[in-house]
Amino acid sequence: MTNALILANTVLFRAFNENKDITPMKLQKLIYFIYKKYLKETELPLFSERFEAWQYGPVLTSVYDGFKVYGSNHIKNYYIDKDSKAWIISMDSSDELSDAFDYVWDEYSDYDGIYLSTLTHKVGTAWYKTLKNNNILLEDKDIKEEEWYH
């Protein structure tokens, strides 16, 4: 299991190396899709933090808090922890995580956060089911059952 903020930094590492812009919204959605792909493939959660159903789709509070200073602008720096360190995940540590990350990156990294948000809002998504049931936390079973949308 990893930490959502470390996964966020890993996404940013890839984006910075490929000169791709990432807004906080886009970061949230890419993390959500990586989590979803990993969950579908392994039947295990990637981290313990739960996604919440916010207005623009699934959100991790820690990632929101870590990058809210950017608003809707492009993120320019990594999340720095209390020890002044910016951690990233070594993709050599898990074939399943590496596969999930690469799949999501290849399929979704060229889209902006607004478009990715619309994908999470479709009827039948975990976000949709959560709001329909007047809940705030997305259930892993609903995330796992969610289809892939383009």
Image (cartoon, rainbow, N blue to C red):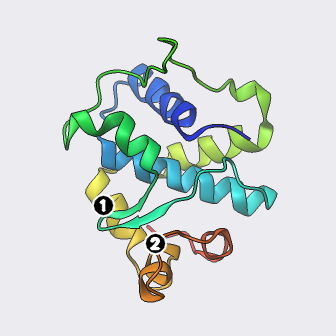
- Looking at the image, is 86 positioned above or below residue 23? above
Element class at badge 1: helix
Q: Position of residue 84 (x, y in %)?
A: 47, 11
- In the picture as drawn, the residue positioned furthest to the top comes out as 84
What residue lies at 43% left-to-right and 88% top-to-bottom? 132
Q: Position of residue 83 (x, y in %)?
A: 52, 12
Q: For this rendering, which residue is in front, 43 or 37?
A: 43
Q: Position of residue 48 (x, y in %)?
A: 66, 50
For label 2, count other residues whose C-alpha is less than 10 Å away and answer few (under 14), some (14-19) or many (20+): some
Q: Amino acid at mark 2?
A: Ile
| Residue bearing mark 2 | 136
- Residue 118 lies in what quarter of the image? bottom left
Answer with left or right where residue 119 lies relative to residue 88. Answer: left
- In the picture as drawn, the residue positioned furthest to the front comes out as 82
Q: Position of residue 131 (x, y in %)?
A: 42, 81
Quarter that holds the C terminus: bottom left
Answer with left or right where residue 65 lies relative to residue 96. Answer: left
| Residue bearing mark 1 | 115
* Numbered mark located on residue 84 in the image: none
Element class at badge 2: loop
- Looking at the image, is 19 positioned above or below residue 97? above
What residue lies at 56% left-to-right and 36% top-to-bottom? 7
Q: Amino acid at mark 1?
A: Tyr
Q: For this rendering, which residue is in front, 133 or 20?
A: 133
Answer with left or right where residue 112 lies relative to residue 138. Answer: left
